[in-house]
Image (cartoon, rainbow, N blue to C red):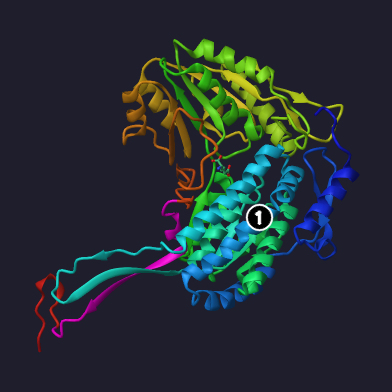
């Protein structure tokens, strides 16, 4: 795993793999180079769309919408079922592209594709469960109910760190809800996007559905902005930084569009004196160092009771010292590269700032494999012990940098958990049931995801995924997140032959 493959080997692997997924690599070639974080060398050159392409894409998506909304939801589910089957066929191919483009280790890249298959299964079931309620009408001979209808064109803006799964959570649900999708993927992972799109295009052909239900526009910020501003995009689902969300949210709201925002996280685990420290250590290491710290659910803070904080720090430090860092495509590697130089420099700056603010670097830090891969950025996952939640601790640094803080009483721990601007995920490790319940209660964690005795990352697709405060408030994936992709109509039907008015109003001429 200390062997880093050459640029030409990865280039060939990328093109062959994308071709197997159905991408016409000649047709998508262009003059924008992407670099593999695995070795920091050129991976592929692809063509970019610009913002001007969005209008045409929306027009075509709207035409597909007019056809697709007429198809019964369970029949729409058949398309998503086919998508899930084809994703299973191409699981290893897509995982390879994810590893090549964003540096995920094979097991996590395969896990990302499994999330895609899982959401397809979920959405197929959902296609027969787009339930509306009926309510008792206050008027005799009347029926009151609600019906859910397809919403319209869904725009999806996704980030590099889940370059395919985030699209699939939106797309599988949008398709059964009757909506076409236009995707602006991360510019760092165009092949993963083109391959995912090609697989859906195949599923659409197999099912005889409208081709323009799926469109992908590889490009830069101008494509995203055009989607944000286009009145024909009914729902804009955007995953990325809080800075991006702050720009997107008000612009979509200004045109009375709907947005679904999945932004930054600064996720913590509270570790109580009764925690099983073995299990806690494993849970923390996976959530903090896994995916090289580049999940929005990555654990960035541990808030540990003063009686266990030293022992836990020792255990974490010794686990960190054993973490195999290296080529993500090789078996046994647990920590792959950071996405690029800026991510590494951001981590370095945060460590420096933490030390300035009174912290102490107790594990990891610095760069690995610099000689073997001078243009790639393999960071050693780092742990900083710090007594206070300083400015840098309250900020999301998208890298494997974990702060460990002490607490004295449980209320203080909950307050620290909540005292950051973000509100995505949180955990408590405890054997004390009352503490676990407090953490889950209205006075507990203020996050969208609140766990007991597991880490902050690695959520299943069956639950709604998202968070509060600067995380943006959106929910996607499972549970009733589908409602964001549909419009609700409230219906009152009068079969009484009379015309009684609600609220006892009398109005007779
Ligand atoms: C993200 O990092 O953008 O809960 C999504 C998790 C994954 C999804 C992460 N299921 O860690």
For the point 43% across and 29% down, the residue is 417
Nearest to the observer: residue 429 or residue 269: 429
Q: Who's the residue at 44% across and 65% down the image?
A: 486
Residue 499 position (above or below residue 39): below
Q: Is residue 496 magenta?
A: yes
Other residues around mark 1 within 10 Å, as few (<14) / some (14–19) / many (≥20): many
**Quarter of the displayed picture in which ligand 1 can be seen:** top right
Q: Is residue 371 visible?
A: yes
Across and down, in percent, residue 79 comes to: 58, 66
Q: Nearer the viewer, residue 211 or 394?
A: 211
- Please tell me whether residue 456 is drawn above or below residue 32 in the rendered image: above
Q: Secondary structure at mark 1?
A: helix
Q: Quadrant of the C terminus?
A: bottom left
Relative to residue 504, is residue 193 depicted above or below?
above
Choose between 409 and 457: the one closer to the eye.
457
In the image: residue 120, left or right of residue 420: right
| Residue nearer the viewer, 140 or 247 | 140
* Residue 420 position in % (x across, y down): 46, 33
Left or right of 496: which side holds 320? right
**Image point (65%, 63%), residue name:** 200
- Dot 1 beta carbon under 8 Å from ligand 1: no
Is residue 149 shown in magenta?
A: no
Magenta stretch: give its range: 479-498
The residue beneath circle 1 is: 87
Name the side, left or right, on which 268 lies relative to 433: right
Across and down, in percent, residue 243 comes to 57, 46
Residue 356 appearing in the image: no
Residue 6, percent across and down? 89, 39
> Which residue reaches farthest bottom?
509
Name the quarter where the N terminus is drawn: top right
Q: Which residue sits at x=76%, y=62%?
A: 22
């Amino acid at each position: 795993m200390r062997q880093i493959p050459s640029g030409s080997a990865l280039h060939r692997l990328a093109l062959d793999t994308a071709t197997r997924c159905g991408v016409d690599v000649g047709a998508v070639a262009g003059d924008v180079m992407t670099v593999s974080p695995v070795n920091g060398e050129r991976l592929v050159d692809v063509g970019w769309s610009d913002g001007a392409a969005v209008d045409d894409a929306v027009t075509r998506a709207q035409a597909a919408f007019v056809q697709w909304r007429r198809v019964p939801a369970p029949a729409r589910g058949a398309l998503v079922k086919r998508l899930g089957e084809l994703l299973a066929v191409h699981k290893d191919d897509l995982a390879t592209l994810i590893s090549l483009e964003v540096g995920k280790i094979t097991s996590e890249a395969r896990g990302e594709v499994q999330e895609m298959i899982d959401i397809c299964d979920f959405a197929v079931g959902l296609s027969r469960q787009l339930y509306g309620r009926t309510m008792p009408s206050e008027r005799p001979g009347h029926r009151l109910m609600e019906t859910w209808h397809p919403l319209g064109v869904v725009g999806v803006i996704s980030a590099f760190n889940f370059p395919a799964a985030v699209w699939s959570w939106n797309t599988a649900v949008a398709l059964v809800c009757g909506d076409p999708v236009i995707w602006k993927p991360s510019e760092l992972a165009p092949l993963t996007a083109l391959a995912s799109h090609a697989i859906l295009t195949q599923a659409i052909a197999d099912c005889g559905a409208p081709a323009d239900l799926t469109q992908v526009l590889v490009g830069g910020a101008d494509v995203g902005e055009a989607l944000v501003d286009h009145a024909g995009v009914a729902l804009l689902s955007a995953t990325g930084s809080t800075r991006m969300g702050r720009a997107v949210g008000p612009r979509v709201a200004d045109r009375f569009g709907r947005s679904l925002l999945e932004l930054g996280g600064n996720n913590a685990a509270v570790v109580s004196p009764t925690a099983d420290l073995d299990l806690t250590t494993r849970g923390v290491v996976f959530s903090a160092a896994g995916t090289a710290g580049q999940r929005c659910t990555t654990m960035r803070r541990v808030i540990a009771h003063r009686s266990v904080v030293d022992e836990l720090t020792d255990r974490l430090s010794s686990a960190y010292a054993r973490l195999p860092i290296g080529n993500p495509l090789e078996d046994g590697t647990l920590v792959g590269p950071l996405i690029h130089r800026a991510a590494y420099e951001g981590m370095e700056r945060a460590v420096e700032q933490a030390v300035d603010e009174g912290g102490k670097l107790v594990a990891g830090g610095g760069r690995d494999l610099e000689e073997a891969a001078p243009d790639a950025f393999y960071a050693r996952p780092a742990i900083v012990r710090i007594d206070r939640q300083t400015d840098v601790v309250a900020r999301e640094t998208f890298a494997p940098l974990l702060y460990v803080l002490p607490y004295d009483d449980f209320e203080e721990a909950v307050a620290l958990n909540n005292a950051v601007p973000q509100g995505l995920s949180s955990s408590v490790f405890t054997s004390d049931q009352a503490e676990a319940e407090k953490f889950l209660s209205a006075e507990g964690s203020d996050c969208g995801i609140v766990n007991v005795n597991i880490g902050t990352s690695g959520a299943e697709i069956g639950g709604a995924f998202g968070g509060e405060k600067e995380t943006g408030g959106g929910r996607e994936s499972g549970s009733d997140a589908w409602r964001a992709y549909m419009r609700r109509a409230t219906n009152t039907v009068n079969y009484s032959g009379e015309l009684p008015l609600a609220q006892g109003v009398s109005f007779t001429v």
